[in-house]
Image: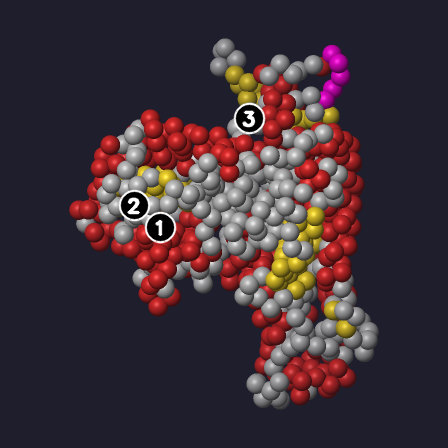
Amino acid sequence: AFRLFEDLRAQEVTPEELLDIGDRFVNRYNPKVGEVLQLDFHPFYDYIPLIRDPKNIGKGVRFLNRYLSSKLFQDPEQWLESLYGFLKVRHFHGNQLLINERIHNHQQLSEQVKLALEFVSDRPDSESYDKFRFKLQEMGFEPGWGNTASRVRETLAMLDELIDEPDDRALEQFLSRIPMIFRIVLVSVHGWFGQEGVLGRPDTGGQVVYVLDQAKSLEKQLQENLTLAGLNIQPKVIILTRLIPNNDGTRCNERLEKIKGTENAWILRVPFREFNPKVTQDWISRFEIWPYLETYAIDAEKELLAEFQGRPDLIVGNYSDGNLVAFLLARRLKVTQCNIAHALEKSKYLFSNLYWQDSEQQYHFSLQFTADLIAMNAANFIISSTYQEIVGTADSVGQYESYQNFTMPDLYHVINGIELFSPKFNVVPPGVNETVFFPYTRTQGRVASDIKRLDEFLFTLDDEAQVFGKLDYPNKRPIFSMARLDRIKNLTGLAECFGKSRKLQERCNLILIAGNLRTEDSSDSEEKAEIIKLYQIIEEYNLYGKIRWLGVRLSKSDSGEVYRVIADRHGIFVQPALFEAFGLTILESMISGLPTFGTQFGGPLEIIQDKVNGILINPTNQEEMAQKILDFVTKCEENPQYWEEISNQGIERVYSTYTWKIHTTRLLSLARIYGFWNYTSKANQEDMLRYLEALFHLIYKPRAKKLLEEHLTLPARA
């Protein structure tokens, strides 16, 4: 930042000065009563090399792998000793893997690899490992190299190459074969986490879909990897979430629930400690759960150790609360920690840090932003869905970038909150569940009775309990959107955009699937406000007969078919969020063959290639948004092939880039490489972790305790 003088001279402003200016702006600058606490994480990043080129931010593992390789390979003796030590400590439930006590040092490892290679080279490619395993054990090699002679030969050849002529490519390939990960925890605390009947409830949307699909894919990929490694081991994946005693018709009060379509993936629900049962027996807003997370992590640790019969190999946190719990668990269990933000609230709520005291009663941002700082700096690696999630664009600040320096007036100044050039950042976009979401043209996967039922439900069914609005002309082209009913998702903004455009109303109907129809059915203040606002918009613009609002929570299979039913009618999908960290509904819509309009603020900017496989919109400019939709509709009426063209390009975009197979293969590769880095580099992160613990105990816990005291006096919900 720069200070501009009257004579147009510019003077650079330090981060400290800039934060003081922010305090002055809100009349919170009080140097006479003492300095405010300053937080600076930059000195703690001296343990790790930093990326130099901004274009390589988000490609951390590639950079780290090259750096690590070059450093180790410069000292062959150290390199071989590190590699030998790393292989020697591989085991599962007390059973030794890869190498045994017959290989005493790295020199012997080098010799025995060549002997083993010579031995397996004489075996038929398809011969099962079990037929020659005892001979390999005599040479010093335990299970884990492969399930057939050809697979064992390939893996040993990679090791031989690493020993003789090491390079970063060979190292990455070799590590992708090594059995290191058997048990994974995915932490997703807030909301209603379940497989059915939860989507659309407060705090319950894309993250639930993401984590469930990720768990299924991880278990499948782990099983495939272990089978190829020749190991008869069943991996286990656990989603750790909150148990809600007053379950409101869901399964959120069940301790353990098997994930459908898996062999050994589970939802493990652990309750918050009781404190005030009038609060803790019910759903609690994600903005209010901070006082319960430390004791929750303590209780969850015991449950996880019992379920796994040992420690997990990887803990993946989700969102601010899940990432903080992941930090607490990883610290206690000494396990690799991965963070996934999904959406950092600081960048969603404008000036939320500057005016935090004004909104503290509702949002408790002092707790959330402190938790974010702790978790993101503690993580061994961070997954983001897009590049701009980390560093933003020329016109917008990245979610993580917004934590670099900021003021929380009267609480603390963040001089350097996160090192964006750290190789811990990796862009790994999620996938879409291809068994549920697939092109509308794939008729063999569709059920005629479901199509008829959902078509009627969307366009003609008269059911006041679930549907508001009766269409005058149901056959008009549908404009469709589906999301939670909250301010950021901006469905009221889409309705207002539609209401302002007579031409759109003449040619299209607006179909919304969103939340509840009545305020008395909602326990979320933001949703209640949006319900009232949506009714006001319908009244103001006289949208009766032109809009249908469905207040339902669809099953997973129905969610997929709804997109296809809209596509059958050559409709469009609009995602009008004021900010969207990634945009799973955009992937779901595109893979279904539905031309998709997505917000330009956030992840959709990287998913949609504008006017190639979708259309980007600015939801803050309703007139422009309406015109873009109208232009598309007009073009489709003039040339019906244009709808097909955008539809097909959208399908291709998802299949080529956004599958769970790609995602989980990459995630597991990252976990292995960061695990290898942590072992071989002996990186000492303890000073950073002690600093983070101090923040947790001196800033986070006192504020959490204060919030808990408020909860203890709350009455039961009506």
**What amino acid type should be assigned to the residue bearing mark 2?**
Pro
Quadrant of the rendered structure where residue 24 is? top right
Graded by Cα atoms within 10 Å as few (under 14), some (14 to 19) or many (20 or more), the crowding at tag 1 reads some
- Per the image, the residue denoted by label 2 is 478
- Per the image, the residue denoted by label 3 is 351
Task: Check if residue 394 falls in the magenta segment.
Answer: no
One can see residue 374 in this view: no
Q: Which of marks 2 and 1 is nearer the N terminus?
A: 1
Q: In this view, does 689 lie to the left or right of 315?
A: right
Q: Are marks 1 and 3 in contact (CB under 8 Å)?
A: no
Q: Are marks 2 and 3 in contact (CB under 8 Å)?
A: no
Graded by Cα atoms within 10 Å as few (under 14), some (14 to 19) or many (20 or more), the crowding at tag 3 reads few
Report the colour scheme: secondary structure
Magenta segment, which residues?
Answer: 32-36
Residue at the location (74% across, 30% down)?
Answer: 709
**Residue 555 percent location from the top left of the image:** 47, 54
- Dot 1 falls on a residue whose secondary structure is helix
**What amino acid type should be assigned to the residue bearing mark 3?**
Phe
Numbered mark located on residue 457 in the image = 1
